[in-house]
Image (cartoon, rainbow, N blue to C red):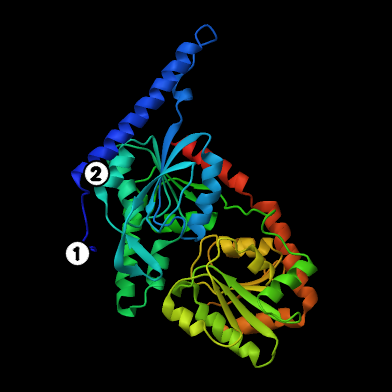
Amino acid sequence: MDDKIDLDDKMDVADKMDVADKMDVADKMDKANHNIEHSAGQGAIDPAEVRKKRLVIATDNFLPRWDGIARFLSEIIPRLKDKYDITVIAPDYGVYEDPNIRLVKIPLYNLIKIGDFRVPKFKFRRIRQTIKSADLVFSQTIGPVGTIAINAAKRYRKPVVAFIHSIEWELVPKAMSNTLLKKYIQLLAKRIAKNTYNKCNLLVVPSSNIADLLLWNNIRTKTEIVNLGVDTAKFKPASAEVKKELRAQLEFNEHDIVLGYHGRISREKDLMTLLRAFMRIQLRFNNVKLLIVGDGVESIKKQLSRKNVVLVGAKNNPVPYLQAMDIYCLASLTETTCLSMLEAMSCGLAVVSTEVGFIKSYIRNNINGLFFEKQNPYYLARQIERLIVDEKLRFKLGESARRMVIDKFSWDHTAAGIDDALSSVR
C-alpha cells in the first residue's frame, strides 16, 4: 500500500501548506512596503527590488545523498541565496537542513529503483502548489520531481530553466539490469526528454557537444553553455608527508601504487571493466591496490569485494581519499562533464578515462590524461601499466591536469553563468 502512486496529497495538509505560503508572502510584502514608506524623500524604491525573486529548484537528486547533482547544488545555492528566495523540491533521502533554503520533501517508493536510484513518488499537488507561488523554476532532472515541476511551470506560465546534468536516454537504460527492457526504455526516455525539455524557456548545458546532441535529437529549446566548477583550494594535491599518513590509515604500503575511483557504484559507470583491468595488472605487479570511494548497487559491490580492492563507501569529503591515490580511472559509458573526474584532476592525479561527453574536450590525450576504449579492459590495463612504469609521465599528466582545472573551472564562474541564465528568462 505504501508504494501505490499517490496523485494528490490529503487536502488538509495541502491547505496548511498553502496558508503558510500565503502568510510567508504577506510578511515579505509588509516588510517591502515598510521599507518603501521609510525611504520617502530619499528617492523611490521599486517593490521588485525589495522583494527577492522566488526561485524554486526542482531536483530528483539531493542531499544527504551525495552525487554530482547534489554537489552542484551545494555549491550553487550559497552563491545565489542573496539574490533569490530559494525553495528546493527534492526526494526525502533523510535528515538534511540548510538555512539558505525552504525544503519541500517528496517521499520515496520503497521498492521501485533504477540502478542505485530510489524513485520519488508522483506528488502532483504538492509540487504544483510550490511551483504556483514561484517567480522562476530551475529544474535539475526529468525524473518524477523535475518533469512534474516543468509541466506545472508551463501550466502556470512560470519561466523555467533546466540544467542538463545527464543524457537520460543514455543513462537510464545503462543503469538497468533487465536487458530485454533496455531498448524500449531508451525510446521512452528519449521521448519524455524531448517532450519535457521543449517546454522549457532555456536549457543550460555544460558543453557545446551536449548542446549539439540535444539539437540533433530535435530538442529545439535555446541553450546556454555554463561549465561546472571545482573548489581547487579544497581539491588539491597532498604533500608527500600527508599522503604517506593518509595511505597508512588505509593500510596501504608506502610503495603501493593505488588506483582509484570516486562516484556512484552503478552499471553505467562500468566498474567491471575497471576490475578486469585491475586483475590483469596484478599478474604483473604485486604492489597495486584499487580504492573505490562510493556506494550503490549491491550486486556490483559484491563483485568488487576481493583481495586488494578497498571499498570505503560514500564520503561527504572525498578529498583525503583522492589524495591517497596515484592514478584515477573512469570506465564510464556515459557522462556529461563528470565532476568527480575534474576533482581528481584538481588533486593532481594522472587520469585514465573513456572518451565520453565533455571529458573528451577537456582531457588532451598524453597531455593531461589518457584515454581508452569503452568496455576494453585490455586497453585500460595497458594505459595504467604505462603510468605505473613511467613515474615521470604520471607526475607530468597530474601537474598538467591540475593547471587545466585551475584555468578553466571555477564555481564562482559557474554561479555567475547560472545567474545570468536565470536572469535572461525572467
Mark toward the start of the polypeptide (1 vs 2) = 1
Which residue corresponds to the image point at 36% horizontal and 31% vertical from the top-left?
24
- Pointer 2: residues within 10 angstroms few (<14), some, or many (20+)? few
Residue 28 seen in the figure: yes
Under circle 2, the secondary element is helix
Among the 4 quarters of the image, the one containing residue 186: bottom left
Q: Is residue 364 left or right of residue 417?
A: right
Under circle 1, the secondary element is loop
Residue that lies at the very extreme toward the bottom in this rendered image: 283
Q: Position of residue 307 (x, y in %)?
A: 58, 88
Task: Look at label 2 and name its amino acid.
Answer: Val
State the CA–CA distance, disc 1 to disc 2: 20 Å
Quadrant containing the N terminus in the rendered view: bottom left
Q: Is residue 200 left or right of residue 66?
A: left
Q: Position of residue 36 (x, y in %)?
A: 46, 15
Residue that lies at the very extreme toward the top in this rendered image: 41
**What residue does disc 1 label?**
1
Task: Look at label 1 and name its amino acid.
Answer: Met
**What residue does disc 2 label?**
13
Which residue corresponds to the image point at 25% horizontal and 49% vertical from the top-left?
124
Q: Position of residue 203 (x, y in %)?
A: 44, 48
